[in-house]
Amino acid sequence: MAWPEISIEDFPPERDDEPSSLRQDIIDELSDHFACALNRELLKNPDEQIAKQRVIQNFGDPIKIARQLWLDAMKEKIMSQRIMTGISVLMAVCGVIVVGMVWSMMKESQAFNTRMMAQMTEIANRPVPEVQTESAAGEMNQVSFQLVQGKQGGKPAIGFTGELTKRGENIDVFKLDAVSNDEGVMDFGKLPWGKYSLNIKSPWDEHYYSELTVLPGRNYSQTIVCPSAAPVEVPVRFEVQWPNDLKSDDWLLLCDFRPRPYHRGMSALSRKIGVENWIRSYPGDGKWDYPMACLINQENQVFRCPLDQNRLFQNLDIDKLEAKQSINMIEGDQYLLPVMYLLKKQDLSELSRLEPHQTERISPYLVLHHDRKFTSELYSNRINLQSGGFGGGSGSFNPTTMIVAQHKIAALRTAAGKNNPIQFANGIQFSKLLKFTAAKDHDNVWRIKLPELSQLKIPEGTKPVEANGSGGGLF
């Protein structure tokens, strides 16, 4: 069934002076706008239900919009009818007044009555002035963009596709497509003034987003610096600063770089070209061309941590993994590390337990704030980048959290004794979110300083706060 579901019956009662095709024309036009908006939202989020909800949030109830469009189309006829009715009533009132005045003056002077009747007749016969309305179209303005490669004054960027969307009232919204020509010019032609959203896509699927305003009577042009080629793989080395109580060949650090949801959508790789930010979205099928999770040992050797078909951890054998001094990552300005796990080699055989199946009972991790004054519960299937948990500001990203292997925490708690008031948390939060850059022609060294295990001791008087990571899960 077509979406949105709008029928002829959703409109007001039919009028005699209504064009026969008006309702169907409105349904066709509105359905086309909603379909275009849905396709655009699906590019950002493949979940169709969420995409439909966002379209409804942006545009409103399609049935209400259809009724409003019908009313706008019939407004002139309805208003004309009302005006004529009002004039008729006014004329009737004037007639009554005239008759009353004539009757009251008849005794004074027949001549005065005659002149008064003539004056009133003249007033009644005056033509009603027509109501003038201004056109909503306004003056048209030329809108175009000059695309260059790599830097200002660079070579023309050819073959980039652009989508320009008019913003504003629902009836005024439209979308245009264009492609940059051999001179790098992306021309959208003459358009009405107002606010627009621009989305430019490279031939290798990197995106540039911006918003612009076209002023009345002024043409709009802008130079946009574009990438000259697709991002490439670059080598990355890890330098982990291990504390003294963790200097053992048995320890491994698992860094989890998988994409995470946050308050504006899904995290994605980006790189800055000139002053412009170009984003490479993660594919909906989960396939990607960089190591989403890495294991690092005491010698700073790195192992690519394989995931299952659902991008979840799976049980591993360390002897079957290849150790390297560096690992190749796709060019990107911000690799975000919201969580990492401190494991022993024996824990790899049960690595899938970090992410229990949705039907299993999930036990939260008890996590200390970086100043060790608060604790929070963190669920493995809800780890994201949304602000919350320890009171981060609106729109801020959660700091990185380090989780220590459950076996080690259990051993520490047992050693402390049941009657010992000092207990140990499962992990601790850093003071900020760790971010790394993989850049071409750079020595990409990603440095991580790990806290002492003693930092996991929960001080007396530590206060709990509400669960961290709420508001949606990754998987």
Image: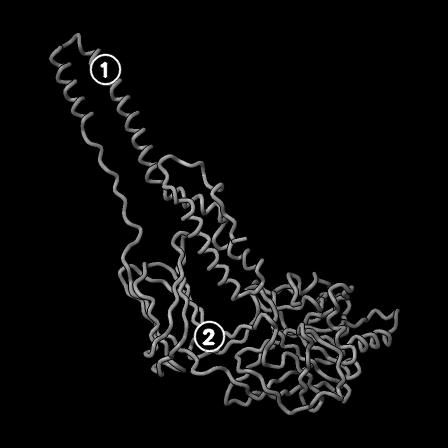
Question: Cα distance, mark 1 to mark 2?
Answer: 78 Å
Q: Which of the pair 246/446 is nearer the observer? A: 446
Q: Residue at x 20, y 14 (%)?
A: 102
Residue drawn at (49%, 42%), measured in percent from left and top? 10
Q: Kindly state the secondary structure of the residue where label 1 is placed.
A: helix
Earlier residue among tags 1 and 2: 1
Q: Nearer the viewer, residue 84 or 36?
A: 36
Q: Which residue is mark 2?
A: 277
The amino acid type found where label 1 is placed reads Val
Q: Quadrant of residue 455?
A: bottom right
The reply to whether the C-beta atoms of the residues labelled 1 and 2 are less than 8 Å apart is no
88 lies left or right of 383: left
How far across and how far down the image is residue 372, in percent? 71, 71
* Mark 2 secondary-structure assignment: strand
Front residue (pair 253, 260): 260
Locate residue 331 relative to residue 87 in the image: left or right.
right
Q: In terms of image quadrants, where is residue 335?
A: bottom right
